[in-house]
Amino acid sequence: MVAYTLSILAAVGAVALTALVFRRVRSAGEDRDPSGPSAAHAGAMLSAMFLLVFAIAIIVPWTTADSARLNTHAESQAAVDAYWSAGELPGTAPQEVRRALHDYVTFVVRDEWPLMAEGVMDPVGGARMDQLRGAVHAIEVAGDQESDAKAAVLDHIRGIAAARAQRTADAAATPPDGLLILTILTGALVVVFPFLAGARPRGLAILPLLATAGLLGFGTYLTWDIAHVFAGPLAVGPEAFTGALQEFTRIAGGL
């Protein structure tokens, strides 16, 4: 933050110094016209800055949400694959492992998803994964088929754990610090700049300015509303996990 403040002060100082130098040049003319070169240049640069900041504020959450959505499908698919592979385990292990997978996915949908909208995860989910992995490690197998089944289940559980770790990061992900403040600041400056430049619109001339202010306000609110992956209009839902639960039922009924 200190570096940002110093960079702003340096830029303002450079402008002030340049203005002071050119004021001493007699050939330089006054520029008080709202449509003059100073106002036109500053307005164009200010609009470009707002568009740049606004684009970043939209694109970052959008790409994060897409990545998080794909990750939920990867995690749910790993759970389905583990459910399939558990059928080759010996004794009562298939029922126990499948029950644990079903309970975990149900927990994610019912209990954990509402917390993710607030940017946090329930540690119980990670504990369940650790417990399931330990239980599968403890299964005694005989023969290549059972050994391969155990290795496959463990591999899929590792996939679930890796995807869960990524989901944890996605739940806590937010746009870069200060981006929303910069969006609000530049948007407000775009709206009030004509007045700062000396223009005094009256009557119908003020309608475009009001429309611009309304659209900028909506756009700025949108950047705040989509800041979290699991909340807002771009929120990633638990559809992949509810689909996994349906797949569990289909697999259990078909075997």
Image (tube, rainbow, N blue to C red):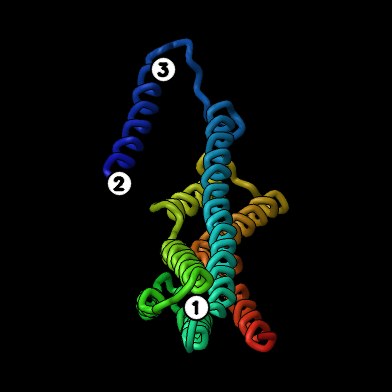
Q: Nearer the viewer, mark 3 or mark 2?
A: 2
State the residue in front, 118 or 10.
118
State the residue in front, 175 or 162.
162
Name the N-terminal-most of marks 3 and 2.
Answer: 2
Residue found at the very far left of the displayed protein: 2
- Look at 50% across and 68% down and name the residue there: 144
Q: Which quadrant is home to the C terminus?
A: bottom right
Looking at numbered disc 1 in the image, what kind of residue is underneath it?
Trp
State the residue in front, 65 or 175.
65
Name the N-terminal-most of marks 3 and 1.
Answer: 3
Which residue is labeled 2 in the image? 1
Vertical order, 9 against 123 (above or below): above
Mark number, residue 141: none
Residue found at the very far front of the displayed protein: 143
Instruction: Tell me how far mark 2 sits from mark 1, CA to CA.
Output: 34 Å
- Tag 3 and tag 2, C-beta contact below 8 Å: no
Instruction: Tell me how far mark 3 sits from mark 2, CA to CA.
Output: 32 Å
Residue 8, image x and y in percent? 35, 37
Looking at numbered disc 3 in the image, what kind of residue is underneath it?
Phe
Which residue is labeled 3 in the image? 22
State the residue in front, 30 or 217.
217
Which residue is labeled 1 in the image? 113
Residue 181, image x and y in percent? 43, 54
Q: Secondary structure at mark 2?
A: loop
Instruction: Tell me how far mark 3 sits from mark 1, CA to CA.
Output: 61 Å
- Look at 38% across and 74% down and name the residue there: 137
